[in-house]
Image (spheres, grey):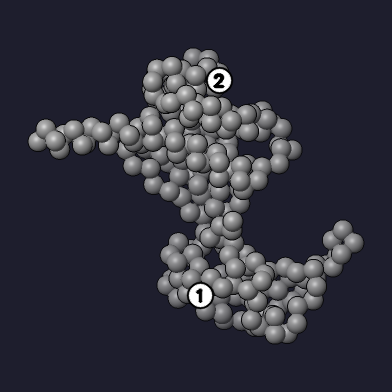
Amino acid sequence: MLSDAVCTVQNMASTICGYCKHRSHMTRTTPPTLRSWESMGKTVWLTQAAFVCDNCENLSVAAFTTDYQPSPADQQEFPPQHQVRWQPQAAIGQEFEDVPLHIASAASEAHSCQSIGAHRAAVLLARAVIEATAKDKGITSGNLVAKIDALANKGHIRDGVAEAAHEVRYLGNDMAHGDLAVDVSIEDSEDALAVMADVLREVFQSHERMAQMKARREA
C-alpha cells in the first residue's frame, strides 16, 4: 500500500500538498526533465517536473524512476504505471481524543513518520507511547516487559493486547539499543501503529467514552 505522499499519477489531480496539507489539484508549471545514472550495473532514469498547488500556490516537485528510458510521451503524461514521489512530502499525523496531550502528540508524530516512509521512527515512537502510557498509570518500575505485563495485570488492557504490545517491544528493542541494521517494512510500522492505537483505546479512550455515556444517562 502506498502512502498519500507516494501516489500513482492517477491520483495526481488530488494529492495531499506537503505545504498546506490539503488534498488539492496540482498544476504542472514546467516541462519534465530527464536524467540518468548507473546503479548496481543498471541504468536508472529519473523524470521530474514542478507543480503548483491550486490551494496554497506553493511549488512541489513530482518525480518517478524507471529502469528504462521513458519515451517523450511517458515523460509528458507521467504514465499511471509509475509511482510518483512528491517533494516536500506531506507528513500526516492523527488525532487521539481523550488521551493525555504529551502521549497523543507522540502518537500523532508516529503516524507522521509512517506517512513519509520513516518506518523505524514510527515503530520506535509506537514503542515509546506504550511505555509512556504505562507510566501515566503509575507503572514506573521495571523494564518495558514488566510495564506491559503490569498494564494487563491491573486490568488496563486485555491479555491479547498485551501480547501484541510485546511484539512491538520485540520489533523496537534492537533499534532502541543502537542496532539500526534492522529492516523495518511498511507492514511492520502499520502493525505497530495499530497496536499502539489499541493500547490507547483500552487505557484512555474506552473509559472516557463510558464515563461520557454514563453522565448522559444520569443526566
Q: Where is residue 34, by image quadrant?
A: bottom right
Mark 2 or mark 1, earlier in chain: 1
Amino acid type assigned to the residue bearing label 2 in the image: Val
Q: Quarter of the image containing the C terminus?
A: top left
Q: Residue furthest bottom?
A: 73
Circle 1 SS class: loop
- Find disc 1 in the rendering and name its residue: 13
Q: Neighbour class for label 1 at 10 Å: few (<14), some, many (≥20)? A: some
- Cα–Cα gap, marks 2 and 1: 47 Å
| Residue drawn at 50 percent across, 36 percent down | 195
Tag on residue 86? none
Q: Neighbour class for label 2 at 10 Å: few (<14), some, many (≥20)? A: some
Q: Quarter of the image containing the N terminus?
A: bottom right
Residue nearest the viewer, comparing 162 with 100: 162
Q: In the rendered view, tell whether residue 11 sits above or below residue 29.
A: above
Residue 24 appears left or right of 209: right
Amino acid type assigned to the residue bearing label 1 in the image: Ala
Residue nearest the viewer, comparing 61 with 175: 175
Q: Where is residue 87, by image quadrant?
A: bottom right
Q: Position of residue 49 (x, y in %)?
A: 63, 76
- Find disc 2 in the rendering and name its residue: 145
| Residue drawn at 75 percent across, 82 percent down | 71
| Residue drawn at 38 percent across, 20 percent down | 155
